[in-house]
Amino acid sequence: MTLMRHFFRVCSVSLVCGLLMVGIARAEVKVGFVDMQRLFDQAPVAIKANKKLTAEFAKRELELQKLSKQIKTQQEALEKNGATMSETEHRNRERDLADLSREFQRKQREFREDLEIRRNEAMSGILDRANRVLKQIAESEKYDLIVQDAVYFSPRIDITDKIIKALADDGKLPN
């Protein structure tokens, strides 16, 4: 008798598990995708931040361009007039050119580092806002999963435009 009970328990548990698996398999799972690169390229808040960064660093970039032209001019003058210069003058000009080149490389490196730091700060703020909007949309539209990085995604699950629009509307969810 106990063997028969055990058999029925195993069958019952198996049947319940099977029914649960069928139920889960038939359940609708709502999935969305957000193209973060497109969001950073097209969201008005990101465009505004990039313009602000460009304006903020324009003066330094112009200085670097001037310094680069100065190096090129000195290098051309050294090549053109180098044969007619005294050895001492030639060495002095080469040393000046090397010093100027080192200064340019240092300033260029500092410029890139400062720009990258500021860009990361700006994009971090945008990413925080985008994630808040994304969470609001996920909760209000009952998404089970939203992916931000994928090898492939169907355009029908792309909700990037919703996020961009909500960011443009200061976080108000689109209808």
Image (tube, helix red, strand yellow):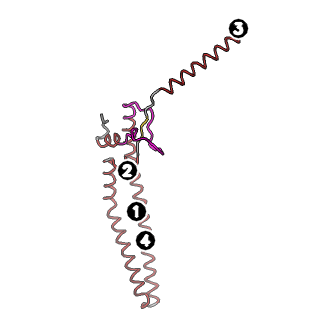
Q: Quadrant of residue 116?
A: bottom left
Q: Secondary structure at mark 1?
A: helix
Residue 57 vs residue 29, the one in the foreground: 29
The region drawn magenta spans 136-160
Going by the numbered disc 4, the residue's amino acid type is Glu
Residue 18 vs residue 164, the one in the foreground: 18
The residue identified by callout 2 is: 122
| Disc with the residue nearer the chain's start (3 vs 2) | 3
Going by the numbered disc 1, the residue's amino acid type is Phe
Give residue 63's position: percent from left, percent from top: 34, 68
| Disc with the residue nearer the chain's start (1 vs 3) | 3
The residue identified by callout 1 is: 111
Per the model, the C-alpha gap separating discs 1 and 3 is 84 Å
The residue identified by callout 4 is: 103
Q: Secondary structure at mark 4?
A: helix
| Disc with the residue nearer the chain's start (4 vs 3) | 3
Is 70 positioned to the left or the right of 21 in the image?
A: left
| Disc with the residue nearer the chain's start (2 vs 1) | 1
Question: Which quadrant holds the C terminus?
Answer: top left
Going by the numbered disc 3, the residue's amino acid type is Met
| Disc with the residue nearer the chain's start (4 vs 1) | 4
80 magenta-colored: no
Residue at image location 40% in from the left, 42% down from the top: 34
Q: Quadrant of residue 5?
A: top right
Query: Crowding at label 4, few (<14), some or many (≥20) Cα neighbours within 10 Å?
Result: some
Question: Which quadrant holds the N terminus?
Answer: top right
- Above or below, 86 against 166 in this view is below
